[in-house]
Image (cartoon, rainbow, N blue to C red):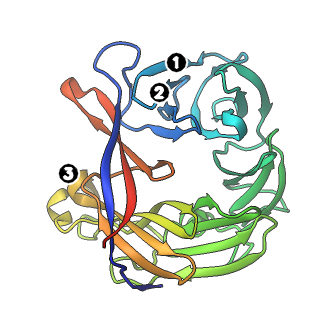
Amino acid sequence: MALDLCDCEISVQPFVTLGEVDGPAGLEAEDHGVKVDSRGRLIVWAPLADHFRVFGPSGALEGVVGRGGQGPGEYVNIMGILVGPADSLYVFDIGQSRLSVIDPGLEFARSASLSQLTVGAGFYADDHFVVNERYLTPESVGMPLHVLDLEGNVLWSFGSTISGAYRPDLREALSNRRISAGNPGRLWAARQNSYTIEHWTHSGELLSILKRDVEWFPEWMKAQSSADAPPVSAVQALQVRGDTAWVLLKRAGPNWRKAVEASGRLYRVTDPEEYRKSVVEVIDLNSRRVIASAELEMNVISFAGPGLVYRTMLGRGGVPYVVLEHLELVVNH
């Protein structure tokens, strides 16, 4: 993919801030996941928590859902949440290898056992979704993408463009994908270790590959392990919106050397904000060209929904809060 900037720019506007210093809306951890449903409600959870919060579009807390335990509507370690059809929520509890379904009214509906400790990535249709995970079965070994039904059963696996052989030493590099649904029956999957985006049918047919060769994103097999090596670039998230793909990336900051120091045989990052920077690029899927690119002031975690990015920050007294910003492609006239 070549850089072919249009007469446009990526507009970044504040959207909403979630959390408070005291009270039920307060957040507990420095990292959170965030998803938005069709009503504009924001679902927020801390990894490995036993509950999650639901905020309204204005940032007001609407409810705290779940509690610790092993009964219906109880959780041990929440690792991910999907917004499903009609705004049902699919909660992946790796502490119990269980998938729980919460109805749009935020009431527990049902649960199913998961054969793997997996985290959902996105829906293809009303009755199945896809995950990027490791399944060490004869049918799935070496395949990074798996289609599951709503009960958590693996229907089929696909996605290996290299080899079906399982490589535990290179799993992170070869298997990790960032996934976005496309047109019905289609899937876009970006490799984490290479600026490469694959277009698949959900039955496993590879339709095309988009690859961008840039100096600041060399393909890697293992992340850096020295204070003298810059942080690797990586695809953080992928979101397909109409005829465009929005790619969220992390790359070494210009002052990365000042933000890391040796610590024995390892290294310590002293300033994460300077160590790596967030970059967003917009790809025109028809021309297969990058039409807009921008470095974001805020180091974001991922997309919460269409055009929404987020990250967790620390406020007064070290209390975390979540900041969301809206990204839009603006055509200059």
Q: Give the CA separation, mark 2 to mark 3.
A: 33 Å
Residue denoted by label 2: 56
Asked whether the viewer can see residue 194, the reply is: no
Q: Give the CA separation, mark 1 to mark 3.
A: 33 Å
The residue sitting at 30% across, 49% down in the picture is 13
Name the spot of residue 306 as percent of width and height, x first.
51, 51
The quadrant of the picture occupied by the C terminus is bottom left
Residue 77: give its label. none
Labels 2, 3: front one: 2
Q: Nearer the viewer, residue 113 or 207?
A: 207
Q: Amino acid at mark 1?
A: Val
Residue 271: give its label. 3
Residue at the outermost front position: 333
Q: Is residue 209 placed above or below 281 in the rendered structure?
A: below
Q: Is residue 293 placed above or below 85 in the rendered structure?
A: below
Residue denoted by label 1: 64
The residue sitting at 69% across, 40% down in the picture is 84
The residue sitting at 79% across, 33% down in the picture is 113
Residue at the outermost top position: 23
